[in-house]
Image (cartoon, rainbow, N blue to C red):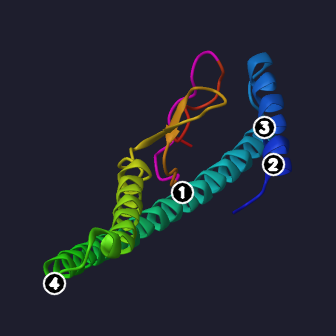
Amino acid sequence: MHDSTEEEAELLSLLRRFLALCRRKPVSPVEGAMFHEILKEIRHMSDMFANELAQLQADVAAQGTVIASATTAFQGLAAQIAAAETAAKNAGASDTQVAGIAAVRQGLEANTAALAAAVPANTPAAATSAVPSPATGLTAPAVNTGTAGATAPTATTGVPPAGTV
């Protein structure tokens, strides 16, 4: 994963300074260019985050498939052990003689049930089109491709809305 805490802090500081300037006076071409570069970097970081999140979700889904396959295999093994236990009893084995096989079967069934419960409990919900930011509570696009056309700046900040530059 990309560790960019210092880069993020620097970008945030620059963005705050720029927004403070925008509130005081009209934006100069130099400031506008600086803001554009900051937005490009934010888009790049957003895209990297979205790609890494998508990869992580795919990895979790693949693990879920493997776990589900293992659960099915273990359930089949437990059924075979139960059949062997029944066959041994039918052949005249005592409960004491079959107790070891029964304990193995019961342990396998318990572990299989726990494994089967882990799949739905750890499978992420379907991806949504927006990702809430824990720091601000605002919702940002899941993937910011930067393809939207430019729009007019907002009246309060003089800065175009997010995802429009």
Kind of residue sitting beneath label 1: Leu
Amino acid type indicated by mark 3: Leu
| Closer to us: 100 or 122 | 100
Q: Badge 1: how crowded within 10 Å, few (<14), some, or many (20+)?
A: some
Query: Is residue 36 shown above or below 23?
Result: below
Question: Which residue: 58% across, 17% down?
Answer: 155
Examine the structure image and report whether residue 6 is included in the region drawn in magenta. Answer: no
Q: Do residues under tags 4 and 3 come within 8 Å of each other at their CB atoms?
A: no
Which residue is denoted by mark 3 in the rendering?
Answer: 12
**Residue 53: numbered disc:** 1
Q: Earlier in the sequence, mark 1 or mark 4?
A: 1
Q: Secondary structure at mark 4?
A: loop
* Residue hosting label 4: 91
Tell me the CA gap for discs 1 and 3: 22 Å
Residue 141, image x, y percentages: 49, 43
Question: Could you tell me the amino acid type at mark 4?
Answer: Ala
Query: What residue sits right under mark 2 in the picture?
Result: 5
| Magenta range | 146-156
In the rendered view, tell whether residue 89 sits above or below residue 48: below
N-terminal label among 4 and 3: 3
Give the spatial CA distance, label 4 vs label 3. 76 Å
